[in-house]
Amino acid sequence: MMSLHNHTSFSDGDWSPAEVIEAAAAMGITSVGINDHFAATHVNAVMPEYLSNYVAKVREAAAQYRGRIEVFIGAELHASPNRTVFEQVDLAALAELDYLVVEYVGDEARSGMPFWDFIEYRKKIPCHVGLAHTDVALRLGHVEAKELAELLKMEKIFMELNTNKQYARLGKQFYRHWPELFREIGRAEGELSMGTDVHSRVADVGNISDAEDFARSLGAEGCFERCLASIRRRSKERNI
C-alpha cells in the first residue's frame, strides 16, 4: 500500500515528516512519500536554496522508521510560472529527490504549462516524475487513450490517483472520469501512484482504498508496483 502525496510543516502541512510517517505506518501503509511544495510563491514552500536541508531532515525522520515502513523523499512543483520561481530552480539539484510530482499541467485557469511543453520539461528532470491530481479527461480527453498511455510510459511519467475530495468533478474523483486511459496504462505496463494530499488531516494518509479498487477493476494494479520499483531504483542510484 502506497501513499506518496503528503505535505508537512516544511510547506503548507500541519504535521512534521515524522508525524506523517508514523501515521502512515500505523494505518498499514507500506510505502509513504513526503512531497512538500517546492519553489512556490502562492503557498508556503521549500525554496530552492533550502532543498538540501529539506532532504536531510526528511531522511533523518525516515531513519527512525527503517525496517518498519519505506519512506521516499519527493516534492511538488506547480506548473505555472505565475506561481513558481522557475528562474531559481536548478533542475540538476532535483537529483537529490526520489521523485517529483507536477501539478496543474494543462490547466489554463491556473496558467499551467501546456502538456506538450511539460513533456519537454520532463526530459531535463533527473529524478522520477509524475503528474499530480490531473483531471486528464478534461485536459487531455482529445488524445487517444492508448496513445497517451504509451507516451507516458515512453517519457517515464507516472500518473497519480489522488483520493482527496477536492480533486473531484461531478461527484467523482478525476481519475474516474476516464477509466479507459487507466486501463490502457495497465496494458502498456505503465506506472501509477496513489496519494491523498495530506495537509491538516494526517489520518487521511491511509485513505487510498478508492484508488486501489479503481485500478484493480481495470486490471491496472500492477502499475503501482512498477512505479515504486522506479522510485526505489532512483533512490538507490541517488544514494550510491
Image (cartoon, rainbow, N blue to C red):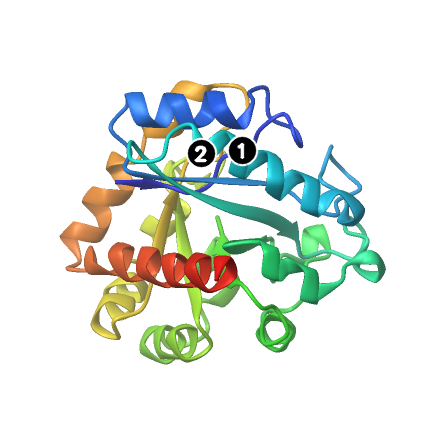
How many neighbours does mark 1 have within 10 angstroms: few (below 14), some (14-19), or many (20 or more)? few
Q: Which residue is mark 1?
A: 60
Q: Residue at x 63, y 56 (%)?
A: 107
The answer to whether residue 180 is above or below residue 11 is below
For marks 1 and 2, give the CA distance.
5 Å
Q: Nearer the viewer, residue 51 or 210?
A: 51
Q: Nearer the viewer, residue 50 or 56?
A: 56
Q: Residue at x 41, y 48 (%)?
A: 174
**Image mark for residue 63:** 2
Q: Residue at x 55, y 55 (%)?
A: 100
- In the rendered structure, which amino acid carries the disc numbered 2? Ala
The picture places residue 92, in percent across and down from the top left corner, at 68, 67
The answer to whether residue 48 is above or below residue 126 is above
Marks 1 and 2 in Cβ contact (< 8 Å): yes
The answer to whether residue 121 is above or below residue 35 is below
- In the rendered structure, which amino acid carries the disc numbered 1? Glu
Which quadrant is the N terminus positioned in?
top left
